[in-house]
Amino acid sequence: MLEITSTRHNPFVDPQLHVWGWEIPVYLFFGGMIAGMMILAGIAMLRVARGEDPESFFSVQTPLLGFMLMNVGMLALLLDLSHKLYVWAVYLTFEPLSPMSWGSWVLLVAYGILMASALVRIGDSWPWLTRTFPVVGRLSAALETPSRLRLLAFANIGFGIGLGIYTGILLSAMVARPLWNSAILGPLFLFSGLSAAAAMVHIAVRIFPGRPAPQGLVGGAFAAMWQPLGARAPRAGTENALVRADVGFLGVELVLLALLLLGLVTAGASQIAAAQILISGAYAPAFWGAIVFAGIVLPIALQLLELGHRIPHTVVPALLVLAGGFALRWVLVNAGQASQVLQSASR
Amino acid sequence: MARFGMVIDTAKCVGCMDCVVACQTENDVPHGHCRDWIVTEVRGTYPTLEMEIRSERCNHCDNPPCVYCCPTGASHVEPFGKTVQVTANRCIGCKACLAACPYGARFVHPEGYADKCTFCLHRVKEGKDPACVSVCPTRCMHFGDLDDPKSEVNRLLGSRKWHTLLPEAGTKPRIFYLD
């Protein structure tokens, strides 16, 4: 028997750690999705730079919505800080051992890359912008040389991978939280972000199957994720390629999730107790129901049926993927805070 | 350069909480928060039970995860005594250090920055003991330089059996509890 009684009563720490509320899961979700959008855009840019037919794949303009979502994510992050007026202190230093310091600098560079990438073909999604400010149109045209597109593509892919992995490493670097303390969180959040990004493009595909598309602030950015660079609607096979990619991302995510649990249940007592929080504890219904079943297995099944022409393409699997991606962050952030290094019952 | 640590004799501690009150008074700890606290631990199988009462606080670890995770350097190892300290006006309130500490030793000050035990460095610089140590009625708490082989803390560690909290976390805590 081991019975511990403590007089400590600190807010956010007792009876169990709960320092992070909704803001951090929102930030991690958008961060992962933006990372996925950057990687998808980078791949598309490489293909355009190579001179491939731009109508056969999704747009290079995913960073436009990514840039807008980045502002939402960073706002959520700012709202979480309890000493907000001192946020500038992050950019007065670089702390090589702190994942959050790495992430802050990666976010800053990614912000610049997203802003530059959003300018590519911006006249297609926000024509009013280039009409009002012709200099934006000239900047956009200047970015379209193959060499500059290739440079932007590598920057998007490199920093997209960095941003996606960082959102997981941010949590996994904490030895005090056994549920988080696994490097698998990095690639898990990266692939979850990729599937969320593909899902967003898929939703745009369904809602705006071709031109004419909306050209407003949000509608233009959203439609631009799918609009072909040419004047015609995209080829039918393109949507299937997107769905196939999403099934692949979700499959890898499922394997990584299984490896995360396997690593925990085959480790020490603290890790086993942490795994139990997900497997059979307070977060089990959300973990099995919202993440594994509704967020991964069901979308994979639906998308395979879509690919086999058994059911028509709908936005349902994509919406499930987005909800599952958010649930993954929400559950892991909360369940991880509930996990702790256990004191040995014998000495 | 000194490396401060604390030795607490659990055979003498009665859990009177004088150390807690002294800390709150000395450091103006905000109401509803505490930098140190009392833990009562009962272990064993009836009827062979044993109880340990101990005063806990930040362990000023040699391998401090709170310092490593801090994105601004607000959490740092102070050269004087190699203690772990927080610079309030560099802390952004991200709370990563609270999540990183396996001892739950930190809290968010109502003004927004991370706060915790400082080993009363302002007193130590004047040659005094930390407030908690100075008021202990059973004299169960001892403060000193762990790098000085002749210090009282090292004499106690060499003469008695002791343990630290959660050594498996790998943080190398510098508060030692005499059995």
Image: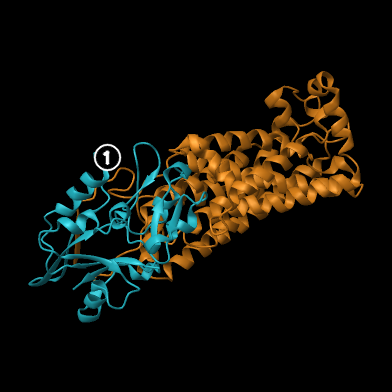
Chain colours: A orange, B cyan
Apparent side of residue B162 relative to residue A85 in the rendered image (left or right)? left
User: What chain does badge 1 belong to?
Assistant: B
Q: Answer with left or right where residue A277 lies relative to residue B155.
A: right
The residue pinned by badge 1 equals: B30
| Residue at far front of view | B126
A244 or B106: nearer the viewer? B106
Q: Quadrant of residue A185?
A: bottom right
Coordinates of residue A294 in the picture (x, y in percent): 52, 46
| Residue A302 visible (yes or no) | no
The residue under the point 36% across, 65% down is: A270
Amino acid carrying mark 1 in the image? Pro
Q: Report the quarter where the C terminus of chain A lies.
A: bottom left
Disc 1 is placed on an element classified as loop
In this view, the residue in front, B20 or A140, is B20
Is residue A64 depicted above or below B72 in this figure?
Answer: above
Using the rendered image of the protein, determine whether residue A316 is visible from the camera's viewpoint.
yes
Q: Residue at x 61, y 42 (%)?
A: A317
User: What is the quadrant of the N terminus of chain A in the image?
Assistant: bottom left
Q: Is residue A312 above or below residue A176?
A: above
Residue at the spot x=86%, y=23% of the render?
A: A134
Residue A230 image position (x, y, % from top left): 88, 34
Q: Quadrant of residue B151?
A: bottom left
* Image coordinates for residue A11, horizontal then vertical, percent: 30, 42
In-front residue for pair A175/A288: A175
